[in-house]
Image: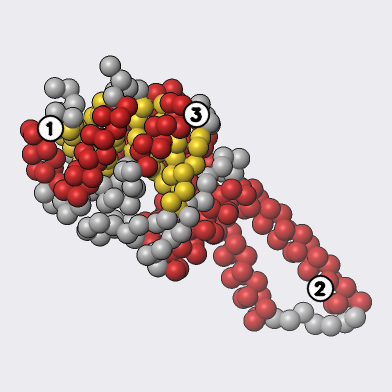
Amino acid sequence: MGHLISIIVPCYNEEASLPYFYDAITAESDKMSGEYGVEFEYLFVNDGSKDKTLEILKDYAQKDTRVKYISFSRNFGKESAIYAGLQASRGDFTAMMDADLQDPPALLEEMYEAVTKEGFDCAASRRTTRKGEPPIRSFFARCFYRLINKISKTEVVDGARDFRLMSRQMVNAILSMTEYNRFSKGIFGWVGFKTKWLEYENTERVAGETKWSFWKLLLYSLDGIMAFSTAPLALSSFTGLLFCIVAFVMILIIIVKTLILGDPVAGYPSLVCIIFLVSGVQLFCIGILGQYLSKTYLEAKNRPIYIIKESNTEE
């Protein structure tokens, strides 16, 4: 009996793309089963979809015993869906894929070769191009990767996708990190393990629309920065120290101009500008502290990462 490979597929309103994905993944699975003698299980995590995603998954589960589904009580986010899938997976190796076919199933064979024959613990994918993305989104994405790799000790590879095949040992290491505020790209890098990167050109969604708006991606990137770096806290401290030095120098200048040179102190306009500037910097630094405090507050509550409404994983 060969290895069991678990395929985790987070789904949120994916009724349009699921038929294409199911056909593609089953074709690749059948091919690999014939060549390597491996078995598969498909773990679809329905993240509170409002369309017919769950109905489609139930239909697949009745026809194909490899199909397992987990349905959340509401939308908890992709990070929660990934964690739920990892917890439910039983495979010797576990892969994660998106249902929109932007993650090519054909790479699974190369990934399996890497982790079984080449000594790697993980085979991960990264995009070499961002074809099809809005230019402004691509620009900020590249800026984010450059920034987080400079201020964090955890490496986050530019263009890295969640699409990867991992050993059971690496999956268990990820599951040991039970934090509520999750940033998987950082977690994958933090746990370490030997990873082979497979490059491919970006492909557009096979159907449906992306659920990641620019605003959601911006908030997600901020979560990543705060989860794996304390640099913003250091920045606020440095800014406070800098303004203290500037204020001290300005006081000396004013004293010299007034007492020695007899130059009257400029009044209202300059004072108002200084007050607005200093107040803005103070609010900015307090905002940074507030973000870290809010993350600590959410962790301290110890709430569950997700809540399952129904599932067939126990059958």
Q: Earlier in the sequence, mark 1 or mark 2?
A: 1
Q: Which mark is residue 254?
A: 2
Q: Crowdedness of circle 1 by 10 Å Cα count: few (<14), some, many (20+)? A: few
Q: Secondary structure at mark 2?
A: helix
The residue sitting at the right extreme is 260
- Name the residue type under label 2: Ile
Q: Where residue 216 sits: x, y (%)?
A: 37, 56
Contact, mark 1 vs mark 3 (Cβ under 8 Å): no
Closer to us: mark 1 or mark 3? 3
Is residue 87 visible to us here? no
Q: Crowdedness of circle 2 by 10 Å Cα count: few (<14), some, many (20+)? A: some
Q: Earlier in the sequence, mark 1 or mark 3?
A: 1
The residue tagged 1 is: 64
Q: Where residue 135 sits: x, y (%)?
A: 44, 69
- Residue at point 27%, 51% (across, down): 100
As measured in the structure, the alpha-carbon distance from the residue carrying label 1 to the one carrying label 2 is 81 Å
- Residue at point 38%, 60% (across, down): 215
Q: Which mark is residue 118?
A: 3
Closer to us: mark 1 or mark 2? 1
Contact, mark 3 vs mark 2 (Cβ under 8 Å): no
The residue sitting at the top extreme is 1
Q: Nearer the viewer, residue 33 or 140?
A: 33
Q: Secondary structure at mark 1?
A: loop
**Is 138 rendered above or below residue 197?**
below
As measured in the structure, the alpha-carbon distance from the residue carrying label 3 to the one carrying label 2 is 70 Å
Q: Earlier in the sequence, mark 3 or mark 2?
A: 3
Is residue 244 visible to us here? yes
- Residue at point 28%, 24% (across, down): 37
Contact, mark 1 vs mark 2 (Cβ under 8 Å): no
- Relative to 80, is 22 on the left or the right? left
